[in-house]
Amino acid sequence: MKLEQQLADVPLFNGLTSDQLQQAAAIAMTQNVSRGQTIFSEGDDCRGFYVVLEGQVKIFKLAMDGKEQILHIFGHGEPFAEVAVFTGTTYPANALALKKSRLCFFPCRAFTDMISQHPAMAMNMLAALSIRLKKFAHMIESLSLKEVPGRLATHLLLLSGEQDNSDTVELHIPKGQLASLLGTIPETLSRILSRMTSQGLIKGEGNTITLLDRQGLSLLASGEEKL
Amino acid sequence: MKLEQQLADVPLFNGLTSDQLQQAAAIAMTQNVSRGQTIFSEGDDCRGFYVVLEGQVKIFKLAMDGKEQILHIFGHGEPFAEVAVFTGTTYPANALALKKSRLCFFPCRAFTDMISQHPAMAMNMLAALSIRLKKFAHMIESLSLKEVPGRLATHLLLLSGEQDNSDTVELHIPKGQLASLLGTIPETLSRILSRMTSQGLIKGEGNTITLLDRQGLSLLASGEEKL
DNA sequence: CGCTGCGTTGAGCTTCTTCAACGATCGTGG
DNA sequence: CCACGATCGTTGAAGAAGCTCAACGCAGCG
């Protein structure tokens, strides 16, 4: 498939004419990465930003002792590392492919030029950054004000929302990565999953979890009740 | 002082002609708030965003049990609540004046119109949001990967950086608020401050803290050492 | 003078992490 | 085809960090 057709699918480029899309495609380069491959590391000089065409990428911070905190997991159509472009500094976190992926790379300069010429793109980008800020605020709230069961319940309900409100949600990532996303460790997550199961809140089978008691989960998520 | 002169001082409006500044001033309204006054609450419909002309405002989330997590403290020249404008939803957190303040309010619509007409403003806004995202990422890292002493050390070194690298830093906020900013409670913060003092890392006097051992603080901040 | 907000200190408890061991699954190479 | 190692997940016991609850000191202010 042509690159510009794939870009048409990316929310960031919504509202662009096909001419403009072509222009965007012209300054971009595709890049294939294999599972487990590092895309960039915290502190690297920012050369540009990426869009995930296919696959899955995690953005994360590392502690001295090796513990990691995942900031974001990006999939099809999502841009990442734009922040570094606009602050004009080094990448503030690490990026690694969780699956074999195909990325699209936009060099800093060409991209900022393009944005300042197309107000529609600027607005799209502002909306994208705003949504991301909201997610971060949510994450901060979770980490600071909720205990792990509450964070997990919130996450499960969110996933259900993303997946047609189905009671059977697909995690899409290994449990260890989920732990890292929720700001905890695999051991703790495992214990809490089994506690939730034994209390009839959920039923788990591999990477698929069935929500059995939405109301109970909501109470956990809001912090009104403890596990 | 004329409003447009004050706006010229705001980074967000950098690079605008005086005509454009006047235009911005025309759609804005000033608003005075007293110490402790709520500016908006989480879930309120977004009518527009604000710039702090004078004073101090905190943005925070509240837990069921009343514990609060401060997301940001804004002072002179800083905009807030732009996120709600671009996502077009309700305010995602609470805003309250920590001091008697003067604000400048911009209605959603007039502001987005203005931004799409002035690429310079769009770029300024993108830069502002990016910096904010970086700060949030930093906060998430702190909350998840560092213990309270490390967070405090990081914060003190950051404050010093903002204050001419002086060894004597001014907190600007009461200690209870600092606790809430660092994701902990006043009791814990108090204990850690006294532990740091007894170990010769700092010396505190009211709202002013003297850094006695920058290197020791750095080791704490990076997590290489424990208190 | 008494009140209220803020900060400090102590004792006990909860939650989470650490450390260690073990089981399951999967892909690879013999 | 089986054996092996690697990755991943689970479980247990012990320990650490931070929170809760309660009491107290202190300053500012009506």
Image: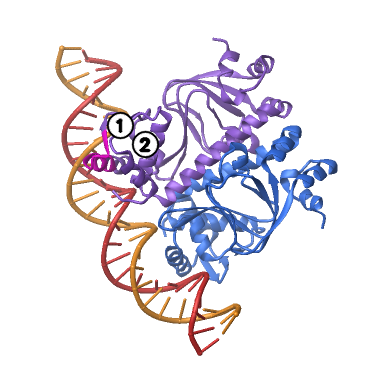
Chain colours: A purple, B blue, C red, D orange
Q: Is residue A198 left or right of residue A110?
A: left
Residue A187 vertical position relative to residue D18 in the rendered view, above or below: above
The picture places residue A64, in percent across and down from the top left corner, at: 43, 45
Q: Is residue A123 left or right of residue B188?
A: right
A195 part of magenta stretch: yes
A89 part of magenta stretch: no
Disc 2 with disc 1 on a shared chain: yes
Q: Which residues are magenta?
A: A191-203
Residue B112 vertical position relative to residue A103 in the rendered view, above or below: below
Label 1 SS? strand
Label 2 SS? helix
Label 2 to label 1: alpha-carbon separation: 8 Å
Q: Are there few (<14), some (14-19), or many (20+) residues within 10 Å of tag 2?
A: many
Instruction: Identify the residue at horizontal 81%, vertical 41% (top origin).
Output: B20
* Residue A156: image tag: 2
The picture places residue B149, in percent across and down from the top left corner, at: 45, 58
- The subunit carrying tag 1 is A
Q: Amino acid at mark 2?
A: Leu
- The subunit carrying tag 2 is A
Q: Amino acid at mark 1?
A: Ile
Q: Are marks 2 and 1 in contact (CB under 8 Å)?
A: yes
* Residue A209: image tag: 1
The picture places residue A200, in percent across and down from the top left corner, at: 23, 39
Which one is nearer the viewer's eye here, B123 or A185?
B123
The mark total stands at 2
Outermost top residue: A1
Residue B13 vertical position relative to residue B73 in the rendered view, above or below: above
Q: Is residue A161 left or right of residue B205?
A: left
The picture places residue B70, in percent across and down from the top left corner, at: 52, 54
